Every structure is written in C-alpha cells, then in structure tokens.
Image (cartoon, grey):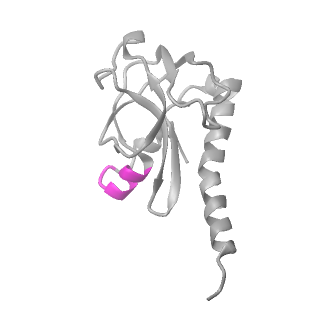
Amino acid sequence: MGIHSATDTEYDWIWYANMVGGQFASHPAIQAAKLMVVDKTQSSTQSLPEVWNRTDEWYNFKRLNKDVKVLLKIDETSYKGGSLDGDHPMAWYHDYDGGRAFYTELGHTEESYKDSFYLKHILGGWIIRKRDRNTRLMKRNSRKPF
C-alpha cells in the first residue's frame, strides 16, 4: 500500500516502480482541484462523491504502469501544473508479482488526515490490498492433497 510520496523514492529500482505503479516526476504548488471517481465499485471509492473537490499537492508521474486499474483521476483543467495531457491517474491498484498493490497520490496535507472521505479512501485501499491476500489464502487452504 502506497500513500503520496511512495512514488517519490527508489528511482533506480524498476521492480519497485512497477509495483507501486509509477514514479514521481514533479508537482506544482498545493492547490484545489477536482478528482473524478473512475471506478465506484471498489471499497476505496464507494463513499466518495463522483467529483471530489479537494486541496492537496498534485503529483505528475513518469513510468506509469499501464497494467494498473485506475480508481481516481484528476481534472487537469481544474488546476495549474498538470503534465499528463488529461489522462492523469491519482489512485489505482493492480495485481503484481504474486500480490496486490494499492496506491493513492493523495495525502500530502495535514488536513487530509482529518477528512472523512480521505480516511475512508485509505481504509478502502487497505481492504482492496488485503482482499487479494485473503482470496489467495482461501484458494491455498482449499487445495486437496493428491
């Protein structure tokens, strides 16, 4: 599970970049922007409004892993400094190397950790990540000996 600056480390470790889903490239000043829920079926986005207006530090990314399942995108027309030509994911998950990874770009500001939508988003990300582990354990435990 990665939160915010988890993409801003280990630049020479490609396995890590692929697992977390991308790498930090840059960010503009902290400002308000609009986030759009892409997948409302997942636990990390179920309680979020379709369009979520919030203030945070918005990362631009490089080396985005195209295999991730995007949960949130940012509307690059709603703030200054976006560099991904309108296709700008901000939260995602995917199966990777035998496990499941969840990442959210949100969470730079102290206010984030008082925001009930944000806290539900984080808890939902933990559930997404953990759900895969539980499924794998159930499959392993249900195997019959030959």
Q: Which residues are magenta?
A: 11-19
Please report the residue visible at 66 percent of the width from the left and 60 percent of the height from the top: 134
Q: Position of residue 128 (x, y in %)?
A: 61, 46
Asked whether, in this view, residue 145 is left or right of residue 95, the answer is right
Q: Is residue 58 magenta?
A: no
Q: What secondary structure do most residues of the magenta stretch adopt?
A: helix
The picture places residue 107, in percent across and down from the top left corner, at 56, 31
Q: Quadrant of residue 133?
A: bottom right
Above or below, 11 relative to 115: below
Residue 77 in picture, x, y percent from top left: 37, 11
Residue drawn at 44 percent across, 48 percent down: 20
Q: Is residue 105 above or below residue 142?
A: above
| Visible residue check, residue 13 | no
Front residue of 102 and 23: 102
Residue sitting at x 56%, y 25%: 109
Give the residue drawn at x 69%, y 73%.
141
Residue farthest along the bottom direction in this orientation: 146
Would residue 110 be found to the left or right of residue 96 on screen? right
Q: Quadrant of the C terminus?
A: bottom right
